Image (tube, rainbow, N blue to C red):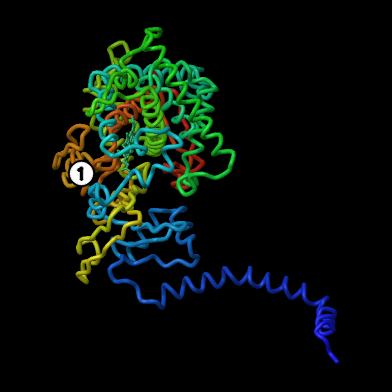
Amino acid sequence: TVTVETLLATTWEAAEPYVPKSLYGQALALIAGFPLLAILLNVARQVLLPRDPKLPPEVFHLIPVFGSAASYGNDPIGFFESSRRKYGDCFTFVLLGRKMTVCMGPRGSNLVLGGKLSQVSAEEAYTHLTTPVFGEGVVYDCPNHMLMEQKRFVKFGLSQENFEAYVGMIDEEVTNFLNKDTRFATFQENDPSKWDSFHAFRTLSEITILTASRTLQGKEVRSSLDKTFSQRYLDLDGGFTPINFMFPNLPLPSYRRRDRAQKAMSDFYVDILRKRQAGKSEHDHDMMASLMGQSYKDGTPLSERDIAHILIALLMAGQHTSSATSSWMLLHVAENPDVGEALYQEQVEKFRNADGSWRTMTYDELRKLPVLDSVIRETLRLHPPIHSIIRKVISDIPVPPTLSAPSEDKTYLIPKGHFVMASPAVSQVDPLIWAEPLKWNPARWAESAAQTHYSTYYEAGEKVDFGFGVVSKGTESPYQPFGAGRHRCIGEQFAYLQIGAILATLVRNIEMKLTHPVPEHNYHTMITLPKDPCDIAYRRRTKA
Ligand code: HEM
């Protein structure tokens, strides 16, 4: 007779060598099969299931959750352009589990950048990235109306009067850099026949931080630009990457370094502030001085920490944007010696004294240099540092038919919970708008009335005041390197001044050329940077 025990025993015995193998095999099959199944189900969902006609079309992707992360991450502009051809001006893609709805073209930019406060939120899109770096209580870690007031406070420090003083300071910093930095040893040898080279981005990053700290950030910061400050800055910067944007908190050393650096940087600014309040330090009328003593409309004063965190935010907002722009600009100038020569002649005509020495430009003069201005403008058209502007959708947004699918007269609805994205970078190279859009051609800003119209539209056009002074609305302009609407950049004039003054001092002193093509874009950083090789060959100009 077969008892339960014997049955079990025989089964076990017979099965013994076999059972574990089978289990491992099944487990392996399951592990290997699960992703495959998930991919198949994801594909089937997209191909077979009917899609809610109210939703914008979704970019086809194989891997669930991961979505189009690789295509977007490697080349966002190429990804936007090819998706636009397939799906129209409004489409959704999956980015590591988030639904991103892209709104292309000037109408798309208008929808995102001109979005109502009840529909879109910049705070909810950016705070997890920016608050650990800037610190609490400011920018995206406070209600929008407080950010608008903070922008108004900052604008006090960006006054015409301050700008007048800044031109000379920047000239002095760049001249000192050329005369003292070891990378410019050949320049210092004073032999105009010798060529040497410098790395565009690394060099301009240093010049940018030197000039920004000398002007906006103040004397104490400039004199503290030693190893400790630089290391803190680098640690903070290491927390400002696309990985941090996707994963705000991971148990990784870079996240811990970011948090330590934030605290140290915040204490550093508070310390300067306290010394100033105690009357123990001399300072110019810089940004900290403009922020001290400011109060919100409800009477709440800006706290020391608020001031420290706004200064960190400004440091981060201006550093990569300006250094990337000036690197691209110098690379193009080096590739086009005729433009370099035109820039030089513009300087000679206006600012060279009879004895061959140079006169410092006034801020007003700097703003009225057509060649210099068009070189910066054109560089920002082709290489806007920020390729994606993002907002979180906080209530459903009806998309006008003109943006949805004009031919079919459909109206989409972008649901709450999605993110919306605008990319002025795409409109800025749209062949329907710009002649030879991929060619760097500063002359287009002088020659063509039509092209100039776009910048006029951006800078003139309808005026609005969101709480930080009157600005051009500009949300439908096809040229928006500084964004538009309530989150429009307030550093625009300073950036033009800083980049322009750096360029003027460099062209007065050196001739440049490129020994390789202008580099491709590196989109793996938050700001679009030039890939390596990124070297500029230079030689000292003769006095003649
Ligand atoms: C906002 C670009 C330099 C401070 C922005 C935005 C863009 C931009 C596109 C809009 C972001 C959005 O809507 O989400 C640039 C470029 C620069 C530059 C291309 C240089 C070439 C600066 C500088 C400063 C600065 C030098 C500070 C002195 C700010 C601030 C905001 C902003 C405070 C407002 C953020 C908001 O309201 O949400 N910038 N920026 N930027 N930028 Fe700049």
Q: Residue at x 47, y 32 (%)?
A: 537
> In x, y percent, where is residue 41?
49, 73
Taking the image as shown, residue 490 lies to the left or right of residue 267, namely: left
Q: Is mark 1 within 8 Å of ligand 1?
A: no
**Outermost residue, top direction?**
280
Q: Residue at x 47, y 17 (%)?
A: 179
Q: Quadrant of residue 5?
A: bottom right
Q: How many marks?
A: 1
- Up/down of 310 relative to 41, above or below: above
Quadrant of the frame with the C terminus: top left
Quadrant of the frame with the N terminus: bottom right
Pick whichever, 56 or 9, lies toward us: 9
> In x, y percent, where is residue 107?
22, 55
**Outermost residue, bottom direction?**
1
Q: Quadrant of ligand 1?
A: top left
Say whether residue 4 is visible.
yes
Q: Residues within 10 Å of mark 1 (few under 14, many from 20)?
A: many
- Up/down of 466 relative to 295, above or below: below
Say whether residue 372 is visible.
no
Q: Residue at x 25, y 29 (%)?
A: 152
> In x, y percent, where is residue 154?
29, 27
Taking the image as shown, residue 462 lies to the left or right of residue 158, namely: left
> In x, y percent, where is residue 380?
32, 40
Taking the image as shown, residue 180 lies to the left or right of residue 341, namely: right
- Up/down of 369 relative to 71, above or below: above
Pick whichever, 103 or 398, lies toward us: 398
**Outermost residue, left direction?**
462
Q: Residue at x 80, y 84 (%)?
A: 4
**What secondary structure is found at the residue carrying circle 1?**
loop
Residue labelled with disc 1: 474
Looking at the rendered structure, the kind of residue marked 1 is: Gly
